[in-house]
Image (tube, rainbow, N blue to C red):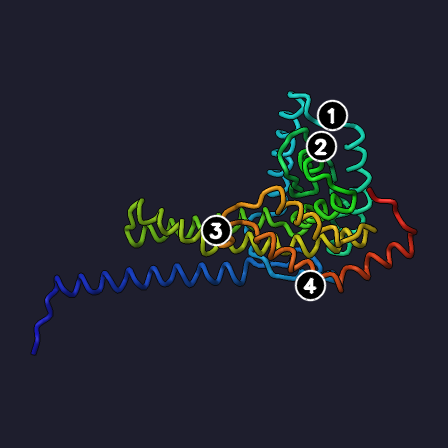
Amino acid sequence: MRYIDMKEFHTVTTKQTMRMKTLLIACMSAAMMTGCATESTTQSGAVGADRKQFMIVSEEDAQRAGSAQYAQLKQQAAARGALNSDKKQYDRLVAIANNIIPQTAVFRSDALSWKWEISLFNSDEINAFCMPGGKIGVYSGLINKLKLTDDEIAVVMGHEIAHALREHSREQMSQALGQQAIFAGLSILTGMNATQLDVLQQAATVGLTLPHSRKDEREADRIGLELAARAGFNPRAGISVWNKMLAADGSGPPQFLSTHPAPESRIQDMEALMPIVMPLYEDTIKNKGHRNHR
């Protein structure tokens, strides 16, 4: 008979307990992130955007944060005389937005009641955004440097509006909170030091956060093309926009470390969607008459 070494017994059982607690956290986190906190934010539309999303941040909180950030950006731009300073360009954006916004009801009817707003920021930056709740911002550098047509602006604007419809910002905030809870639990239960946690968080960024961001971008591309097409803007402009992006900035981080898919990949995805979205565009043109887009 072998007598039990209580010190050895304590060490083994402690390790087993820690492993069980760690496994429990992982299982609870997985259940939370794949089950009870998932929802669909939009209808699928013709392009099929119906992925379930992990949400623990409320829609109201996300919209409140977006509105506050948008107000701050406008205030800062106004102080520099860089807010809506080009009336012709601003009116052009408003006209495009007014054609696209009614089409959002295809994906979610409540978006029609959002307090939509659009701002033109005088900046060389090639960028645009739509914050939660329909707060749109376009930088003049995007239009001027790329010499965008109305169709191209509409595709970009549709893409940014799609982010708001799918509540990608809210989803990313929820993912960040979920990851923080997991890391905090692991730190307490496993005694990880700050360096180990930092390595783990970096691995999570590459393995979890960035792929989700690329998925968001692809969803926004799909929905944006449909929104533009239904509004009477040629969705093939999405391909020309990304060709212009490639010409403007041919260098960038590898795709697996980028929050955006590679431009070449996006162009291929858009080409594959043309059989779906072009008939929508053609029907709109037939019913409303041809628009003379610049």
Q: Quadrant of residue 39?
A: bottom right
User: Which residue is disc 2 drawn over?
Assistant: 120
N-terminal of the pair, mark 4 or mark 2, is 2
N-terminal of the pair, mark 1 or mark 2, is 1
User: Which residue is disc 4 drawn over?
Assistant: 272
In space, the residues marked 4 and 1 are separated at their CA atoms by 39 Å
Badge number at residue 257: 3
N-terminal of the pair, mark 3 or mark 2, is 2
The vertical placement of 80 against 22, above or below, is above
Amino acid bearing label 4: Ala
In space, the residues marked 1 and 2 are separated at their CA atoms by 8 Å
Secondary structure of residue under mark 1: loop
Q: Residues within 10 Å of mark 2 (few under 14, many from 20)?
A: many
Considering depth in this image, is 132 or 143 the residue closer to the camera?
143
N-terminal of the pair, mark 4 or mark 1, is 1
Amino acid bearing label 2: Leu
Considering depth in this image, is 36 or 45 the residue closer to the camera?
45
Indicate the quadrant containing the C terminus: top left, top right, bottom left or bottom right: top right
Q: Residue at x 46, y 61 (%)?
A: 30
Amino acid bearing label 1: Ser
Is residue 137 something that shows in the picture?
A: no
The location of residue 196, given as percent across then percent down, is 31, 49
Q: Mark 2 and mark 1 in contact (Cβ < 8 Å)?
A: yes
The location of residue 187, given as percent across then percent down, is 33, 50
